[in-house]
Amino acid sequence: MATPWPQDEIWPTDYREHATNLAQHINSLKNDLNETNTNAQQTMEEVQRSSEIATDAKAAAKEATEIGKATIKMIRDMKLVSQQNQANAMPTPTCWRGEG
């Protein structure tokens, strides 16, 4: 002989209440997904902004290096000219005697 079906309710709660609870959980998941998407977008924008700042800093450092090199070259050139002028301005022994 076949076993009869249990007489308990199929759903432990009323199906409308169950649907309401399920809808609340689904809505909560939807909100969490939207928040995650917003956070991911904000993070991506921040990473992009940081990348742009790093690129600008690299360009500024390169420019500062080039300026430093140009300054050192100018100082060396000025020293060389100064040394040449001092060598040309040195009195010769004939100048000391008043013959020049």
Image (tube, rainbow, N blue to C red):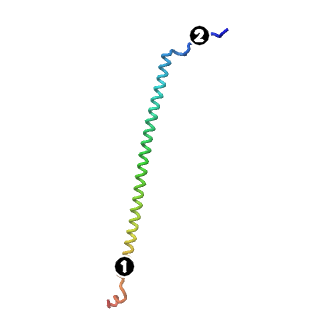
- Residue at the limit of the structure toward the front, as seen here: 1
Q: Which residue is mark 1?
A: 86
The residue sitting at 43% across, 38% down in the picture is 41
Dividing the picture into quadrants, the one containing residue 86 is bottom left
100 or 41: which is nearer to us? 41
Circle 2 packing at 10 Å, graded few (<14), some (14-19), many (20+), is few
On the rendered image, what quadrant is the C terminus found in? bottom left
Residue type at mark 2 is Gln
Q: What is the x, y in percent for residue 68?
A: 40, 63
> Which mark is nearer the camera, 2 or 1?
2
The residue sitting at 37% across, 75% down in the picture is 82
Q: Are marks 2 and 1 in contact (CB under 8 Å)?
A: no
The residue sitting at 42% across, 42% down in the picture is 45
Residue 99 vertical placement versus 67 (above, below): below
Dividing the picture into quadrants, the one containing residue 92 is bottom left
Q: Which residue is mark 2?
A: 7
Residue type at mark 1 is Gln
As measured in the structure, the alpha-carbon distance from the residue carrying label 2 to the one carrying label 1 is 117 Å
